[in-house]
Amino acid sequence: MSVITDIKQAGKEKKLLKITYRKSSGEVSERITEPYEIKLGKYWGYDTEKDEIRQFFIVNILSTEVLEETYEPRWDIKV
């Protein structure tokens, strides 16, 4: 599946999404996120480890995995 397809699926099903992301520094990290919005080439998700909403450039998301764990939305889901 594509990154955008996985984001939309996870948002619609209220499931956590694991992303592998390349930062501008080149460092690669994995994040567990609650999907909320795709807008202007960015993915907005609540980063469960950092405990805050974050924006990720979609082109820098290397891979995604829709997890089985669900979440209770903090805001409206717009994916």
Image: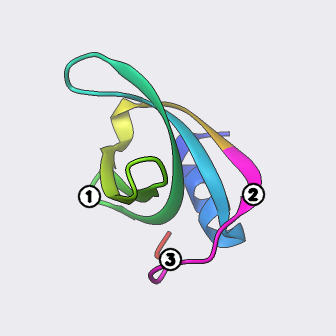
Secondary structure of the residue carrying numbered label 1 = loop
Instruction: State the residue in front, 2 or 17.
Output: 17
* Amino acid bearing label 1: Leu
Q: CA distance from mark 3 to mark 1?
A: 16 Å
Disc 2 versus disc 3: nearer the observer = 2
Q: Earlier in the sequence, mark 2 or mark 3?
A: 2
User: Left of 22 or right of it: where is 67?
Assistant: right
Residue shown at the point (63%, 56%) measured from the top left = 16
Residue under circle 3? 77
- The stretch in magenta equals 66-77
Residue that protrudes farthest toward the right in the picture: 68
* Local crowd size for mark 1, using a 10 Å CA cut-off: few (<14), some (14–19), many (≥20): few
The label shown at residue 73 is: none
- Snapshot quadrant of residue 15: bottom right
Residue that protrudes farthest toward the top in the picture: 26
* Local crowd size for mark 3, using a 10 Å CA cut-off: few (<14), some (14–19), many (≥20): some
Instruction: State the residue in front, 64 or 30.
Output: 30
Residue shown at the point (60%, 40%) measured from the top left = 2
Instruction: State the residue in front, 1 or 53.
Output: 53
Image x and y of residue 51, in percent: 40, 57
Name the image quarter holding the N terminus: top right
Disc 3 versus disc 1: nearer the observer = 3
Q: Earlier in the sequence, mark 3 or mark 1?
A: 1
Q: CA distance from mark 2 to mark 3?
A: 17 Å
Secondary structure of the residue carrying numbered label 2 = strand
Residue shown at the point (53%, 38%) measured from the top left = 19
The label shown at residue 69 is: 2
Q: Is residue 43 above or below residue 14?
A: above
Secondary structure of the residue carrying numbered label 3 = loop
Residue under circle 1? 40
Image x and y of residue 45, in percent: 43, 58
